[in-house]
Amino acid sequence: MNAAASGGRLKRLFSAQDMSLGAPWKRILEFSLPMLIGNLAQQMYNTADSVIVGIYVGDNALAAVGSASPILNLLLALFVGIATGAGILVSQYFGAKERDHLANVIGNCMTLTLLASVIIMVVGLLVTRPLLVMLNTPASILDWCTDYLNIFFLGIVGFAAYNILSGVLRGLGDSLSALVFLIVATVLNIGLDLWFVAGLHMGVAGVALATVIAQAISAVLCCLKLFRMHDVFTLRAAHLRPVRQYVGKIIRLGVPSGVTQAIFSMAMLVVQSLTNSFGEAVIACNVIVMRVDGFAMMPNFTFGQAMTTFTGQNVGAGKPERVRAGAKQGTLMALACAVALTLCILLFGRSLMSIFTSTASLVELSYHMMSILAAGYIAMAVTQSLSGVMRGAGDTMTPMWISIITTVVLRVPIAYGLAFLTRSPEYPVGRPESVFISLLASWVLGALITLGAYRMGRWRRKYEKKEDAV
């Protein structure tokens, strides 16, 4: 009897979870914890590349992997759009208990993922090297960057399928299955990294190949899980056929997020060009800071994703009062977590930086830059949580415009303006702190704008009028 009960509890843990019942903070926390562990594992996944090439190949290889990231993020914007649109619809249809609509959305999402992967693979292979040259990538790391990106784009289907389909699982409230699949992929990725780079001496190319293989396996696991969720929906081959109704909704809800990611990535490319002008040491420093930043930002992203799912399910279930309560409780939890992480960064920052390099000057430079950013994570807790609420309610346009304002209108001019104003014989192109001060400024101003937009309530009017809720 106990064994049967334990088996039942275990099965429920790996099933879709209804977030329209129970205390809002408890449902958000239960959903967030596995996803937070998963996001941390995802960051370990990415960080392993940098740590291993930094140790076994050198600081220039570390810089090469980091310099490839802005281009990668730009070309993956299409997947962000599909994932966001599908996630919102899945959570709303699940909340409304619409099995057939749910199956059609998931099937159409799989088809869109495959089509988008083919497009991105072709475009990526064509534009990679010209973009790197345009961004003033140093000649010493240009070939490594090109190899890394080309291998990644050749295996883009696995990356896209995992990230989008794990988002579908989270939209169903099943963050635990996505976590398990990610842990499998992370362990495999780290093992393959060590084998390819340390054992076979494949360098940066080995890191890219390890990532492609691990992501493909995790994508297969997601597909198998979705095809077996008969208690929630039944996915058949017919559901893979594109239907204008569902494709249109996915695109309509997802395009603002995709555009946001594309604009953000283009702004990052412009700033990356400024970063590259400071030389290899600052490029490597930027890679280290951004890797630690990835860990520090994970709780904020996690609560943002949790708020999207929570809001979507409760909109579908017709429970606006739970949305408002959950928004307040989720944001407070995100803020508490951000404060704790900011203190950890300030106290243990140098130890974190030394994981990536043994070069003392690079550790000190990276810690200095990280200290500039530290308080910004508290601001981002507000931005991510409240933006998640707006997206879950179907208002994806407001977060898009806020992102455009903070990244294009604010960050880029501030970065270049500060660099220009701080030029000197010692720093002929300006002080490298300009890049990080501009990022902090955009985060703080973004939080203030997001809070104002949330209180104005455009997102609330949209779902109350049923304009975008299903």
Image (cartoon, rainbow, N blue to C red):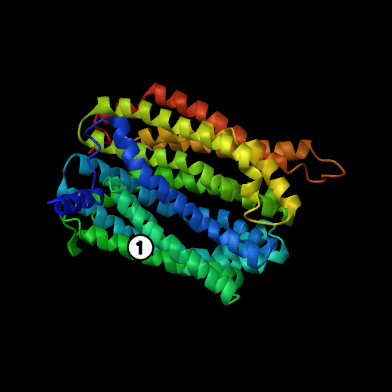
Rendered position, 439 above or below 240: above
Q: Is residue 75 visible?
A: no
Looking at the image, residue 309 sits to the left or right of residue 350; the answer is left
Residue type beneath disc 1? Ala
Q: Residue at x 32, y 40 (%)?
A: 30
Q: Residue at x 50, y 37 (%)?
A: 403
Looking at the image, residue 416 sits to the left or right of residue 217; the answer is right
Looking at the image, residue 465 sits to the left or right of residue 406; the answer is left
Rendered position, 108 above or below 397: below
Q: Nearer the viewer, residue 266 or 315?
A: 315
* Residue bearing mark 1: 219
Rendered position, 15 above or below 63: above
Q: Residue furthest right?
A: 425
* Image quarter of the C terminus: top left
Q: Residues within 10 Å of mark 1 (few under 14, many from 20)?
A: many
The percent coordinates of residue 289 (x first, y second) are 62, 47
Q: Is residue 284 visible?
A: yes
The percent coordinates of residue 350 (x first, y second) are 66, 45
Looking at the image, residue 404 sits to the left or right of residue 58; the answer is left
The percent coordinates of residue 83 (x first, y second) are 36, 50
The percent coordinates of residue 228 (x first, y second) are 20, 60
Q: Residue furthest bottom?
A: 200
Q: Nearer the viewer, residue 167 or 297?
A: 297
